[in-house]
Image (cartoon, helix red, strand yellow):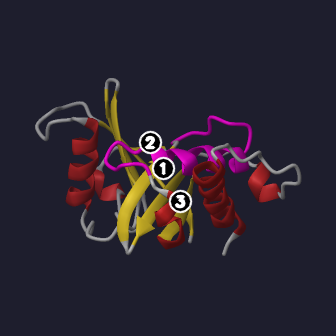
Amino acid sequence: MHPLVKLAKEAVEVCIGDGHVLDTPEELDEEMRQKAGVFICLKKHGELRGCIGTISPVTECLASEIIRNAISASSEDPRFSPVSKDELDGIEYTVDVLYPPEPILDPEELDPKRYGVIVSKGIRRGLLLPDLEGVDTVEQQLDIAMQKAGIEPDEEDIEIQRFKVQRYT
C-alpha cells in the first residue's frame, strides 16, 4: 500500500475507532511535505462510499491535507451516512493528488480519461475527477460537473478548467 493511501486509511480508522484526529507525522518525506489539493475516495465492494477533497491546498502540507480530507470523506460526504466501525475492514481508499488547474477555451482540449474538469459560473463550481468508470466522453464529463455545480446546460459564460492527478490506490 502506498504511504499516502496508508495515511488516509490510518486517519479514518483512528477517527472512527478512537474518536480523535490523527496528528500529522513529524517525519515527512519530500512528497508528503509538498502542498497540493487532494481528493480521497472511499469504496466499499466497488461502490462509492464517500469522496471529499480540495482543489487547492488548505493546510500546510500534503500529509495534513490527506488526513483532513480522508476524515471528511468518511463522515461528511452529504450523499452518504458516516462510515461505521463495522465497515472499516471493507473500505478501499484512493488518493488523488491534484496538479494545478489550467483554463481551457475549447472542450476539445478535454479528455475524461486523462484530465479532470472544473466548471464554474459565478460562485457555483463543480469538479469531476479523471478516469472514472462510466464517464467515457467529454459531454458526459461536462454534464456531470455542471449538475454538481447547479449549472443548467443552456447557461452561457461558463468557465472550464482541466487538471491532471496522480492517483494512488
How packed mark 2 is, by other alpha carbons closer than 10 Å (few <14, some 14-19, many 20 or more), is some
Label ID, residue 73: 1
The structure residue drawn at horizontal position 53% and vertical position 71%, both measured from the top left corner, is: 89
For numbered disc 2, what is the local secondary structure?
loop
The residue at which mark 3 appears reads as 165
Give yes or no for residue 64 being in the magenta stretch. Answer: yes
Give yes or no for residue 2 being in the magenta stretch. Answer: no
The residue at which mark 2 appears reads as 76
* Circles 3, 2 touching at the beta carbon (< 8 Å): no
Residue 57 against residue 107 in the figure, above or below: above
**Residue 142: x, y in percent?**
25, 51
* Between discs 1 and 3, the one toward the N terminus: 1
The structure residue drawn at horizontal position 27% and vertical position 56%, both measured from the top left corner, is: 141
- What is the CA distance from the residue labelled 1 to the residue labelled 3? 18 Å
How packed mark 3 is, by other alpha carbons closer than 10 Å (few <14, some 14-19, many 20 or more), is many
Question: Which one is closest to the eye, mark 3 or mark 2?
Answer: 2
How packed mark 1 is, by other alpha carbons closer than 10 Å (few <14, some 14-19, many 20 or more), is many
Residue 152 against residue 10 in the figure, above or below: above
Residue type, label 3: Val
